[in-house]
Image (tube, helix red, strand yellow):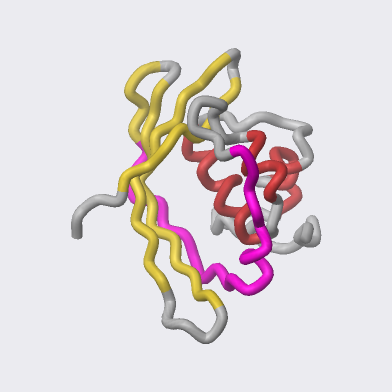
Amino acid sequence: MRAADTTACPCQSGRPYSGCCAPLHRQDAMAENAEALMRSRYSAYVLAESAYLLATWHASTRPSGFDGHDALSTRWLGLEVKRHVVHDPEHATVEFVARYRTGGNPAVRLHEVSRFVREAGRWYYLDGEFPAR
């Protein structure tokens, strides 16, 4: 389910989808840093781009399959990037809060500190922790 190229990018960067996450989703470009990858992965969840999510998940932690069937019943409500920390040229963390609602259920607040690793010039999502409130 692709967004129109002129619409605002779901990652809430303030840029149009065509100049933000679309080139990453089409694999015409690579994320410049861990935050850009995290934003593009959020957009992939919004747009049900499960192939992109798997492709950007590090092989050591990637699930064997990803069933995006819940994407059609999930309404993503917003993304807030709290911080992006570069530990060295190949490791970074991104803390974010994403909000979503599934079906008629109350909204969920997903607060995660995600770890990213860069291999052969490409950033990958490694894993994440849910900080205590």
Residue at 62% from the left image edge and 66% from the top image edge: 70
Give 35 or 66, whichever is nearer the viewer: 66
Q: Residue furthest top?
A: 120
Report x, y in % for residue 90: 44, 18
Quadrant including the C terminus? bottom left
**Figure check: 91 above or below 12:** above
**From which residue to which does the magenta span run?**
64-84
**Figure check: 116 above or below 89:** below
Relative placement, left or right, of 20 versus 87 is: right
Give 123 or 81, whichever is nearer the viewer: 123
Residue at 56% from the left image edge and 81% from the top image edge: 103
Report x, y in % for residue 36: 54, 39
Residue at 54% from the left image edge and 17% from the top image edge: 119
Report x, y in % for residue 69: 67, 63
Residue at 59% from the left image edge and 17% from the top image edge: 121
Asked if the magenta segment contains residue 123, the reply would be no
Q: Residue furthest bottom?
A: 104
